[in-house]
Image (cartoon, helix red, strand yellow):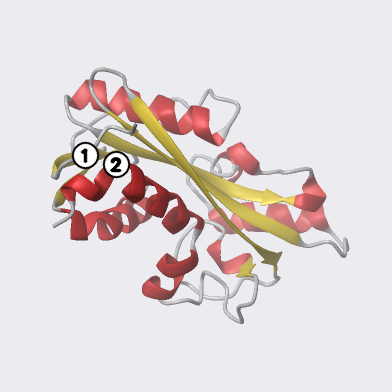
Amino acid sequence: MARALEGGRLVVASHNPGKVQEITELLKPFGVTCLGARELRLPETPETGDSFRANAELKAVAAARAAGLPALADDSGLTVDALGGAPGVYSARWAGPKRDFLMAMQRVERQLGPKADRRAHFVCVLALAWPDGYAESFEGQVHGRLVWPPRGERGFGYDPIFLPEGRSQTFGEMDPAGKHAISHRAEAFRLLVAACLRAGER
């Protein structure tokens, strides 16, 4: 049985402001006060794992131990079928040290070229860890296809080129509430809530 998180303070183990904001919004109804890793001046944990789950747990456990508080880490990325799953766990690295996701999207499009298969999916693993090293992980996915040129300026990362199945707007065009309802992060979050947050619900 998963360990319950009963409100209080939680470290969001990310230096990405967009990601911290999205997770903070998702946690609002549960009496949880979120603190970003940058706000606490925690160092970035190297993503040395070979899977989204491994990286999420590395970051969550490191942040929980450093802050002495429960920590939630996200590792997520874009997986493109025709590119053999790339960029995958290297999604952020494709954007370079300056987090230039326009460059990353251009690289995806350049490598795809004229390929007809533009299927892709986003993966998100949320890992919740405690200072004693205990961790729980939850995975969500959302499937769709890639479009070019990028559409919309909302969201972050690869959102402007990802069109979810059955939708006419990219993640970059959707309002935040619309994206939260169907995103990979929202799906992982639903699983986390069912396992760990019921006791903390307000």
Q: Nearer the viewer, residue 30 or 41?
A: 30
Looking at the picture, does residue 130 appear above or below residue 159? above
The C terminus lies in which quarter of the figure?
Answer: bottom left
Q: Mark 2 or 1 closer to N-term?
A: 1
The one of 8 and 146 positioned closer to us in this rendering: 8
Secondary structure state at the residue bearing disc 2: helix
* Image quarter hosting the N terminus: top left
Task: Tell me the residue at 34%/30% (across/down).
Answer: 60
Q: Are marks 2 and 1 in contact (CB under 8 Å)?
A: yes
Residue 5 numbered tag: 1
Question: Disc 2 residue type?
Answer: Cys
Q: Position of residue 22 (x, y in %)?
A: 34, 58
Asked where in the image residue 110 lies, by quadrant, the reply is bottom right
> Residue 7: horizontal and vertical position, in percent?
14, 45
Give the side of residue 119 with respect to residue 19, left or right: right
Relative placement, left or right, of 127 versus 65 is: right
From the viewer's perspective, is residue 157 above or below residue 155? above
Which residue corresponds to the image point at 20% horizontal and 58% vertical from the top-left?
Answer: 28
Amino acid type of the residue tagged 1 in the rendering:
Leu
Task: Name, please, the residue furthest toward the front.
Answer: 1
Badge 1 marks a residue whose secondary structure is loop
Residue under circle 2? 196
| 198 with respect to 150 (left or right) | left
The answer to whether residue 134 is left or right of residue 31 is: right
The residue furthest bottom is 168
Q: Position of residue 72 (x, y in %)?
A: 31, 38
Residue at 35% x, 27% y is: 135
